[in-house]
Image: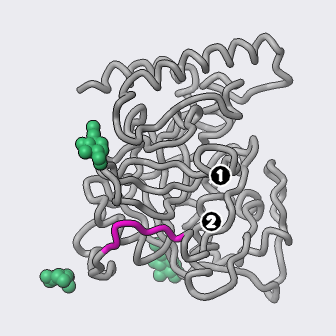
Amino acid sequence: MELRPLCRLWLLYCWCCCGGGRGADPADTFTPTGPRSREQQAAAFRESLNRHRYLNSFFPSENSTAIYGINQFSYLFPAEFKATYLRSKTSRFPKYSAAVQMSISNVSLPLRFDWRDKQVVTQVRNQQTCGGCWAFSVVGVVESAYAIKGKPLEDLSVQQVIDCSYNNYGCNGGSTLNALNWLNKTQVKLVRDSEYPFKAQSGLCHYFSDTQSGFSIKGYSAHDFSDQEDEMAKALFTFGPLVGIVDAVSWQDYLGGIIQHHCSSGEANHAVIITGFDKTGSTPYWIVRNSWGSSWGVDGYAYVKMGGNICGIADFVSAVFV
Ligand SMILES: *[C@@H]1O[C@H](CO)[C@@H](O)[C@H](O)[C@H]1NC(C)=O
Ligand SMILES: *[C@@H]1O[C@H](CO)[C@@H](O)[C@H](O)[C@H]1NC(C)=O
Ligand SMILES: *[C@@H]1O[C@H](CO)[C@@H](O)[C@H](O)[C@H]1NC(C)=O
C-alpha cells in the first residue's frame, strides 16, 4: 500500500509528542512555553515549506486533491501544533448496528446536502490556543439541533462546557463523549455565548440559577460508522450535524481541496463537526467544520473524501437530540 512509507514519516514527525496520546495525563503533555525566538519560528517555517512540498508531491494529477501550504500554523513545529490544537481524547464507540439502524429513517439521500444551506449552522469559531476542540464540536452540534427544531440559531457558551464539564480537562483537552455524557446526565442548561463568553483558557465553573433560561439535551448517540459511511450520511441527514473525531496532524498545512491521503484512522486527536456531504463530483466528500477560525482551510471548513474512513472520520461519531 502506497501510504505506508508516508505514515512512517508522520510517525517520525510526531514521535516526540505521542506521549500525550490516548489515556495519558494531559499535564504530562508537551505545551509550548514562553515566547519563541525568531530563530525557532524561522526554523519551523522552513520545515513547513519542506513538508508542504512533500505533501503536495504525492498525487498532483488527482482530481480535487487537497493542497497544502502556508497558513497561520506554518510557524509552528508539528509537535507544537499537535500539543496545542489536537487535544481530543477518544473512547471506544459502539459499532453502528442493525438494532440502532431502526431509528434512522429509511431516507433516500440527495447527492449533495449541507446543513449550512438550511441556516442552522453558526459561524465558524476560533479556539485560539485553547485545546477545547471537544467542547466546540459538542456545543456547535447542540446549536444546530435547536435551530433544526425551529429555535433561533444562536452561539451557545463553549466556555461553560470548558469550565464546568468536570470529567474533562478544559483547554488541556477532553473527550466529546464525556462532554455529551455530562450534558445528558446533569441536564445542565447551556447559556448563550454572550452570557458566558469564550476566554481561551480554563476557568472556574460559573453556575446559573435554575430559573436561568438555557439549552439542555434530551440524549445523544455514539457510533462507529467505519465501513458504513452511507449509513453515517443518513444519520447526518436525519439528526443534524454530527460530532466526529479525526486524525488532524496533516491539517496543520491544509489549504483546500479534498483530503484523500496523509491522514490515518486510529490516531484520532481532533474533534470537529460534520455538516454535510457532496457526491456530485468524481470524488464524494464530507463537509467538515473546524474551530480554527474562518481563515483556515475553505472558510474554516475542510473537505474529507467519503468512503475509506479517511482521517478516521467515521470512527467516533455522535449525534445529539434536543
Ligand atoms: C427502505 O426502502 C426500500 C425502498 O424504498 C425498501 O425496499 C426497504 O424495505 C425499506 N427498508 C425499511 C427498513 O423500511
Ligand atoms: C441520557 O439520559 C437519559 C435520561 O437520564 C437516559 O435515559 C439515557 O440513557 C442517556 N443517554 C445516553 C446515551 O447515555
Ligand atoms: C477526474 O474527473 C474526471 C471527470 O469527472 C473523470 O473522468 C476522471 O476519471 C477523474 N480522474 C481521476 C484520476 O479520478
Secondary structure of the residue carrying tag 1 is: loop
Q: Position of 89 compared to 205: left or right?
A: left
Q: Residue at x 61, y 38 (%)?
A: 25
For label 2, the residue is 140
Give the amino acid at mark 1. Answer: Ser
Which label is found at residue 230? none
Q: Residue at x 72, y 75 (%)?
A: 154
Say if 29 sits above or below 106 in the image: above
Is the CB–ligand 2 distance for label 2 below 8 Å?
no
For the residues bearing labels 2 and 1, Cβ distance under 8 angstroms = yes
Of 201 and 13, nearer the camera is 13
Ligand 3 placement by image quarter: top left
- Residue drawn at x 68%, y 17% is 44
Task: Give the Cα distance between marks 2 and 1.
Answer: 10 Å
In reply to whether residue 113 is colored magenta, the answer given is yes
The residue to which callout 1 is attached is 291
Residue 92, given in percent of the width and then of the height, sits at 40, 53
Up-down relation of residue 78 to residue 185 (above or below): above
Other residues around mark 1 within 10 Å, as few (<14) / some (14–19) / many (≥20): many
| One can see residue 40 in this view | yes
For the N terminus, give its image quadrant: top left
Query: Residue 209 location, x and y as percent?
Result: 84, 82
User: At which x and y percent is residue 314?
Assistant: 37, 54
Query: Quadrant where the C terminus lies?
Result: bottom right
In the image shown, does 6 or 226 lie closer to the viewer?
6
Residue 317 is one of the magenta-drawn residues: no
| Front position in the image: 1 or 189 | 1
Residue extent of the magenta highlight: 109-115
